[in-house]
Amino acid sequence: MNTFTLGLVVVIYLLVIAYLGYRGYSQTKSAKDYLLAGRDIHPFVMAMSYGATFISTSAIIGFGGIAGVYGMGLIWLTALNIIVGVFIAFIFFGRVTRKMGHNLDAHTFPEFLGNRFQSKKIQIISGAVIFVSMPLYAAVVLIGGARFIESIFEIDFSLALTFFSIIIAAYVIAGGLKGVMYTDALQGSIMFLSLFFLLIVTYQKLGGVSGAHQALTNMVDLVPENLKSAGHEGWTVFPKMNSAWWWALTTNIILGVGVGVLAQPQLIVRFMTVKSNRELNRAVLIGGIFIFVATGFIFTVGALTNVYFHNESGQLAIQFAKGNVDLIIPEYINSAMPEWFVYLFMLALLSAGMSTLSSQFHAMGTSLGRDFIENVFPKKKFNSMMLSKISIIVAIIISIIIGYKLPGSIIARGTAIFFGICAASFLPVYFAALYWKRVTKTAAIWSIITGLLASAFALAFMHAKESEPLGICQALFGKPTLATEFPWMIIDPMVIAMPVSIVVLIAVSLFTQKTSDEHLATCYHGIK
Amino acid sequence: MLGINDPGIILGYLLSVVGLIACVVYGALNWNKGMETSTDEIQRDLDWEEKDEHLKEEI
């Protein structure tokens, strides 16, 4: 790869990003513009922004690599991403969220919950949960992006990290959510085109759709022994029921990520950026196609890399990548794709990281500024836009410090930790806020707190993948996890914590004071 | 089916395609539906802006 050409391509790309960031900046005059993109975002921009925020570099490289090791079982995640993450999210959650958010004058997700339950406490707690847990998730993407820049440009890691952070910070701080969503739309389009091309060329190289799949099916005898014992029965076969990989795939990936998406604050806020349900209806079509290509295509290619590497070198993908799952997709791109595509794919990976990070920075900043500080000091008058800008800077600095200071083993679990906490703390309350009029303010507070505590407990003491690197369980009880019986140490924390949060929500609601009919009428005004 | 024999994987692909078709059909059928027509929504927008302006002046 020619560094000069790559540098030129990246400079052009950054100039376009700068222009889009400037457009966001020039159109941002009020808190509504800064926090909700003026509530008049085009459905294409909304759908692409939702998709690009959801799909980070680690979803492409990490999950693509996992498909290279374990095979096509990950396609179930695509099915859930489309059915739950787009269809159900937009139609059943998005439409009501948009209207109710408008009825309640909500600019952020915590403010939505706070106003729905007439509780500043809920807004403060939700803002704090997001601000405290999201930097770990942001650090994952930030460090991943900086490592990527470090390797392709062969520059120092600190320089890469500084450069990457400053560029994203510039357009997020200046352009607010408009700047974030305009750039997301471009970045999502680059991701879409590259992944679309990647699958087409892969099938062409490997003898067509049936030919490629059949070749992969025929490799069943080559599955290494250690993977066989984990439940691997071939790259075109779903893992063996009740095996370690079966539990990890069904609970951690399919449920944890597939359902967890519904409770992501940075995605939920996008429902409130459009002015009517017509835009959401259109976004369903665009978002469905985007997610199908962005996830389904990379998972399929990931599995098929085994056929390519076996044909070319007699090795499996993971062997060719010297045991590093994250290198399977980059190695495949470098070996199998034309040179011009390598540049495009580099941009796609950069885009995937930037689009996720920009939304994370924006969500963390607004959680700290709008939701936490403004409500903790209610007597002071704040300029929401200025406060959010300062808070975004604080959020970025914290993410960088976390990325530098925390051990890599904890950082690597950042996404799972954030998804787990959000799902257990917010999903039951969020769903009830939209569809269950009997839910009460007290129940909502207790549900968020118990969801948070239960997921923190499951993460620190049960789920071995997090409890081991966190080391709290080891320090207190002298063992890495309290879960001694299979499969409890593998089951996703969400599976344990969310039912607790749901039970508390229902039980406390039945014994506490109902929300007034007058307030419910305001919430549900215009919602059929 | 297309070189894949395991029903678990075939079902995963089928569900993905069904989900995709559902999104496309829903989006196409409702492409022009759901436009906000109520005047109070527009009024609420104006109120938001007024509140923003007022706050700015106060600050």
Image (cartoon, rainbow, N blue to C red):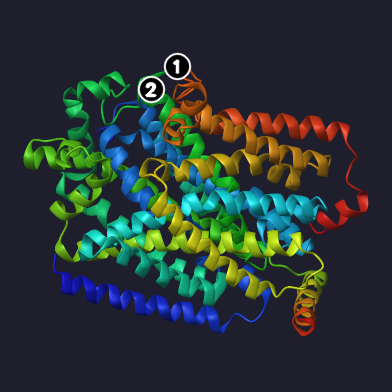
Residue A194 seen in this snapshot: yes
Q: Secondary structure at mark 1?
A: loop
Given residues A73 and A375, the one toward you in this image is A375
Q: Horizontal and vertical percent for residue B56?
A: 74, 81
Residue flagged by tag 2: what amino acid is it? Ala
- Identified at 43% across, 69% down, the residue is A168
- Identified at 45% across, 16% down, the residue is A486
> As displayed, is residue A48 above or below residue A202?
below
Whether labels 1 and 2 belong to a single chain: the reply is yes
Q: Is residue A108 left or right of residue A148?
A: right
Q: Horizontal and vertical percent for residue A324?
A: 23, 41
> As displayed, is residue A228 above or below residue A455?
above
Q: Are marks 1 and 2 in contact (CB under 8 Å)?
A: yes
Q: Quadrant of residue A193?
A: bottom left
Q: Horizontal and vertical percent for residue A30?
A: 67, 78
Q: Which residue is mark 1?
A: A486
Q: Quadrant of the N terminus of chain A?
A: bottom left
Q: Nearer the viewer, mark 1 or mark 2?
A: 1
Residue A528 seen in this snapshot: no
Given residues B14 and A430, the one toward you in this image is A430
Q: Is residue A427 left or right of residue A341?
A: right
Residue flagged by tag 1: what amino acid is it? Phe
Q: Earlier in the sequence, mark 1 or mark 2?
A: 2
Q: Which residue is mark 2?
A: A244
